[in-house]
Image (cartoon, coloured by chain):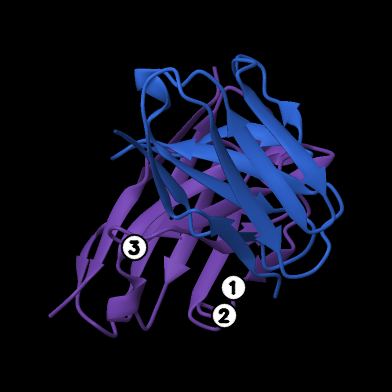
Amino acid sequence: DIQMTQSPSSVSASVGDRVTITCRASQGVSSWLAWYQQKPGKAPKFLIDGASSLQSGVPSKFNGSGSGTDFTLTISSLQPEDFATYYCQQANSLPLTFGGGTKVEIK
Amino acid sequence: EVQLVESGGGLVQPGGSLRLSCEASGFTFSNYWMHWVRQAPGKGLVWVSRINDDGSTWYADSVKGRFTISRDNAKNTVYLEMNSLRAEDTAVYFCARAYCTSCQNYFGPWGQGTLVTVSS
């Protein structure tokens, strides 16, 4: 199984800050990587596929990059609606696996 | 508008069974792979199972042999039959549609989730 390791597990930031979340795969997944945003009590929302392709309607302040084993999600100019938990997920092989999540909290 | 609506969750005793349903609308259901993903209270997301458009099925090791995924294209519904339930199966269960027909291992639209609690 491919293990996905996210860091940090939580980060405190202020409105307007820029936050970077990293995701490392235990083996190469090419660009088969997605990012999701989840708010408390809600279903996850699909943000990015192919490591860097934003879904329709997702603001450009979200930026994904990387390939192989190392990936990043950067959120620029944090707004109140961006405070949530973010998950990476590899789509390269079964079983499909998620990172442990990064909770972005308000400082 | 794509909609996925889960049902069937509830409280069940260890060793018991439950069947979850996920009714889909707003897209051609038969064209898409469908997934179940679960989330234990306060924990992260875990993929559970997938059913392809041709009916092929895959499972996480933790549920293999106990859970069965199936689909009824006439009813636009995917099911998750859960047997021999354990306390560690307690979670919110989400159904999710594959994002696209050429990228079916991404989770596009999600349902709202249904809570399964396994406890005596």
Residue assigned mark 1: B60
Type of residue at label 2? Lys
Q: Amino acid at mark 1?
A: Ala
**At 48% across and 80% down in the image, what residue appears?**
B66
Q: Chain of mark 3?
A: B
* Residue B90 vertical position relative to residue A77 in the rendered view, above or below: below
Q: Indicate which label's residue lies in the foreground, 3 or 1.
A: 3
Which residue is more in the foreground, B16 or A85?
A: A85
Which residue is identified by label 3? B40
Callout 3 touching callout 1 (CB < 8 Å) = no
Q: Earlier in the sequence, mark 2 or mark 3?
A: 3
Find residue B64 and name its label: 2
Say which colour chain A has. blue
Q: Name the element at disc 3.
A: loop
User: Which residue is found at the position 80% from the left and 37% from the top?
Assistant: B101
Element under label 2?
A: loop
Task: Determine the chain carrying the residue at label 2.
Answer: B
Q: Amino acid at mark 3?
A: Ala
Up/down of B75 relative to B48, above or below: above
Label 1 close to label 2 by CB (< 8 Å): yes
Answer with the quarter of the image where residue B16 lies: bottom left
- Residue B26, position as x, y percentages in the image: 58, 22
Residue A21, compared with residue A28, is above or below; it is above
The colour applied to the residues of chain B in this rendering is: purple
